[in-house]
Image: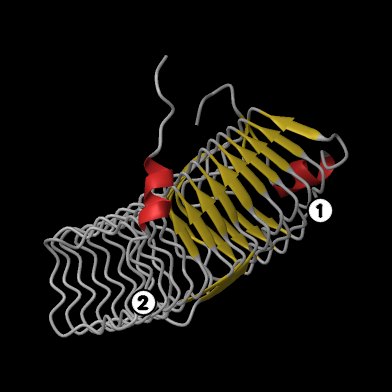
Amino acid sequence: MDKQTIFCDAEALRARAGSGQLAGVSMAGGHYVGLDLSGMRFEGVEASSALFEDCTLHETAWEGGRFDQTRFVRCDLAHSRFEGCRGEDVSFEHTDLGETWWQGCVLAQVNLATARLDRMAAMDCTFAAVRWPQELSGLWLSNCRLPAARLEPGSNWQQVQVQDCQLEDWQMEHAQLNQCGFVQCAMDRLQAAGLQAPYAAFWRCSLREAVLSGAQLGGTNFEQADLAGAVFDASNLRQARLVSARTPGARFVAADLSQADLSHLEAGDADFSQAQLVLANMHDAHFDAACLTGSDRSRIRPTDAERLQAQQWRPAHP
């Protein structure tokens, strides 16, 4: 610890509870039980190896804090703000993080498995190796990096919105996504066999080499997604939107694509053998190198010549 840094034990913190601000102090290794520090602003605080138990930290602000091996147990951090915080092996056990705001934070090995995260929001953050809770609602993430996260089988996420994030190597086997949207996210090598995500959105996402076999994806939006090498074997993709998606090397063996919108699809050498393509919209879709052996293409909707001509029209140059 720096000689200039003042250590604040539980009594010192309790005495400062009404001051509203705490800057440049250390709580490293401290044990804080039952404190009410609601509304406190913590600036540049060192909290590594600290343990907070049953503390009320409602609407607190943490700016530039350090959280190595820090534990929050049964704490109320709802409506709090975290900016520029750093740390590794951070745990929020049975702690309320509802409606918190995170910006510019870098945290690794984060345990959120028993935390409440409803309507939590994060921007420009890196959260590595996160343990997420099974029940989650209203999470919003933007421009974050969250590699190698895992959702426990049976997890139920609702109304989660994620945009411009890096989510490579996630595991979502047999999870449920209800009214969730992923926009322009990197989700390569996603492991999501048995995923239930009807009417979810993966708009303009990269899902290269993702595994979604046996998934329930009816009505899901994969518009302009990169699905190269992805596996959708035996998945339900009825009424799904794959408009202008790319699927070179992908597998849709025995998948149900009935009434799916495959307009402008660049199928490449994808394998659609034994797939159901009844009433699929194949307007300007490119299947020249794809395998369609044994697929049911009855009553497909082929290219609409007039529509294609209108789409390709460009005004004449003067």
Residue drawn where x is 12% and y is 80% of the image = 293
Q: Residue furthest right?
A: 18
SS for callout 1: loop
Q: Is residue 37 left or right of residue 275?
A: right
Report the disc number at residue 173: 2
Residue 212 x %, y %: 31, 73
On the question of residue 108 being in view, the answer is yes
Q: Is residue 80 left or right of residue 291?
A: right
Q: Residues within 10 Å of mark 2 (few under 14, many from 20)?
A: many
Q: Residue furthest top?
A: 318
Report the disc number at residue 294: none
Viewer-proximal residue among 85 and 49: 85
Amino acid under disc 2: Glu
Question: Which comes sooner in the sequence, label 2 or label 1?
Answer: 1
Viewer-proximal residue among 119 and 38: 119
On the question of residue 128 being in view, the answer is no
Structural distance between the alpha carbons of marks 2 and 1: 40 Å
The image quarter containing residue 288 is bottom left
**Do tag 2 and tag 1 residues touch (Cβ < 8 Å)?**
no
Query: Which colour assignment does the render follow?
Result: secondary structure
The image quarter containing residue 267 is bottom left
Residue 113 x %, y %: 52, 69
Q: Is residue 87 above or below residue 135?
A: above
From the image, state whether disc 2 or disc 1 is nearer to you: 2
Residue 158 x %, y %: 60, 70
SS for callout 2: loop
Residue drawn where x is 16% and y is 71% of the image = 271
Q: Is residue 102 left or right of residue 261?
A: right
Amino acid under disc 1: Asp
Residue drawn where x is 17% and y is 66% of the image = 270
Question: Label 1, on which residue?
Answer: 36
